[in-house]
Amino acid sequence: MLRRFASLFKTFPGRWVAAVTLVVVALLIWRPAFTEFLELKFYDLKFRYRGPLTPVPEIAIIGIDDASLQKVGRWPWSREIQARLFSKVKEAGPRVIGLDIVFAEREESAAVRTLANLRREITGRGKATPELLNLLEQEERRADVDRQLARVIGREPPTVLGFFFRDVGGTVRGLQAAELMGESYIRASTYNVVRQLEEIKPGSSPLMAAGGVQVNLPEITAAAAGGGYFNMTPDDDGIVRWTPLAILYGPDFFAPLTLVTMDHYWGRPPLGITLTQLGVKEVRLGARKVPVDRFGRLLINYLGGPGVFPTYSAAAVMEGRIPPNALKDKIVLMGATAVGIYDLRVTPFSGNHPGIDIHAAVIDNLLSGRYMQKLPFALGWSVLILLVLGIILGWALPQLSAFRSIAFTLALAVIFAGGNYLLFTRGWQLDLFYPLLYIGIINVGFTVHRFMQEEKERLRVRRTFEAYVAPAVVHEILKHPDNLRLGGERRELTILFTDIRGFTTLSENLDPEDLVALLHDFLNPMSNIIIEHGGTIDKYIGDAIMALFGAPLELADHAPRACRTALHMTAALRDLGKEWATAGRPQFRIGVGVNSGVAAVGNMGSDRLFDYTAIGDNVNLASRLEGLNKYFGTDILVSEATAKALGDAFILRKVDLVQVKGKAQPQEIYELMGEGTPEPELARFLEAFDQALTFFRTRQWAESVAALDEALHLRPHDSLGRRYRLLCKKLLKDPPGPDWVPVTVMSEK
């Protein structure tokens, strides 16, 4: 058994799977920045794919939005206005209010300044009495907007203030006197520590520590029911995915605004934190446990983008323009949502997400219990998943073809991603990118290995066949070995011939170098068009091209492909002609002949050299149709067999009944004029020409001339129409005998 297991690592699949497993497990443990960045992006993608969720009904947001700034004025507003806003909110009957606002500086109103100046002036003149001074001090206190705000904040329902820690992430250190004063103002938001670390050494603790604090004014702090920090700690890519539920400042651990607000909502159960040498084990609100990582962070389960929570404009609240029970018994969060106040964050859902919405998402998680948390023993699960995937891929991929291995790999990736997403919708986060990376690397390795093995086989086949088979055919054998039978076979296909008109004259007027360059610039795009439409270039015959559609690889639609190719070739030549005219190079036209039918295809030639080609009467007919273009003044001629195969998908007109050399029966030939439905003018032209041809064949040459005149009026330069008109005039002048038939006999090839 052990020998069999060990033998697996002697083969490429075993060695490759083992090597990739070790590398990806190392990445899982090390988590370098570039792979972790991609893992986080996949995490964000799961949120966007899941879409928004319905929030709990207990949360409402009062937003200091752009409409409020437009009505009230720029932020920060005076404490008097804010006191009026808070009064309106409290009158609406919420259970608790959380403020994502800090009142760190005093505001001196004009009334306070006037009273203070009056008191100083009276005192300076010696006219002050104790009663008068006492009265002025009372009036000053009444006019003090900070005290007014504090009085409003102190009313029921309870208000939880926000404050801000500075230098979060710094090392634990002792506090200076001023910092101790700030620490005393926020002590109400500290945790009850269940088990303290034995010793916190600077720089050794995984806990988040703060270096300073921005607190509210003492009288406002004293009036509030409590306070909590509103710091957010984005990841390295700037996206807020976690929220710290515990920050160490001085000797104490502090709770955030969200947790303290919920503490008051739930009737002040004790806030507790359990610590170990590894960091934070758990955070509790009474009997409720909040899942955090060892840094004391909660992974936020976002419900959606901005606006997912009921949000009311601060201006609308002050003006009484909100529904009567909009805030009744709610947890009301108040903060900035306006763009200009710059309290916007980047989240998995949005690049401009108000911070107050993020606090609301955390509170929703606490209320509903729909937390997002990492799967317990996540690293172990990830490694186990890699091992299972490695076994599956190592067993399956060597047995599958390249296409099937890609399909299998994609299916496996989709199944894993679907399971991962299902876990995500249940609130469990497990690595997605690393296993997908693992699947991709293993598949790439097997694909490259298979490619190298196939290249070795191709080289062997090439060396075997190139001695007696043309390289172009070897290429086809290597591309489609199962579809090609050496030795020849009868095949239904379409043959296309194209030739430059007047090439002999052209070659006599050009230097050999210029002629070769011109041929290259012509043959290159024409060849590309043939290949793009699924054709096979049989051979180049000087300036001519012979192409096959339906051999060596079978094509059900070989006739439409060949005709589409012919149309694109003539269109491309017109574009080339414009370029060549600008460059002073000669211009020319081509004739194209297309015929469909059965031909013998296969490797043909001598014992020393074979060439894959097609032979037979249908090949000869295609070649002769190409030559007839010059006779009839057309560009593309197709046989009757090809015309029947096209149906109504292309625009055709009958040209003539032609008896070519070597054929006993005349062939109806057609001019290919386009694809699709003809424009109205072209349709009228074709109708008139077809009527003229019918008159011509029934010896009604005068009527044919009249119909041709109508057609030539629409297309004066139509060579075929002018040819028939001259022929009708000739027949009218010298009528033939009764044995005349409307067939053109071509005595030459």
Image: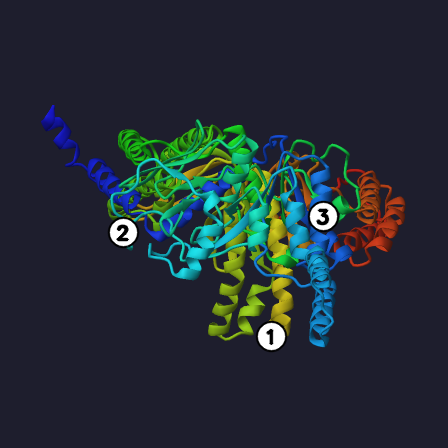
In percent of width and height, residue 19 lies at: 22, 42
Q: Secondary structure at mark 3?
A: helix
Q: Secondary structure at mark 2?
A: loop
Q: Earlier in the sequence, mark 3 or mark 2?
A: 3
The residue closer to the viewer here, 472 or 144, is: 144
In percent of width and height, residue 531 lies at: 50, 49
Left or right: where 572 falls relative to 5: right
Query: Dot 1 corresponds to which residue?
Result: 583
Left or right: where 592 falls relative to 260: right
The answer to the question of whether label 1 and label 3 lie on touching residues, with beta carbons closer than 8 A, is no
Query: Dot 2 corresponds to which residue?
Result: 204
Which dot, 1 or 3, sits closer to the camera? 3
Residue at the outermost left position:
3
Mark 3 to mark 2: distance in Å? 45 Å
What kind of residue is marked 2?
A: Ser
In percent of width and height, residue 523 lies at: 51, 59
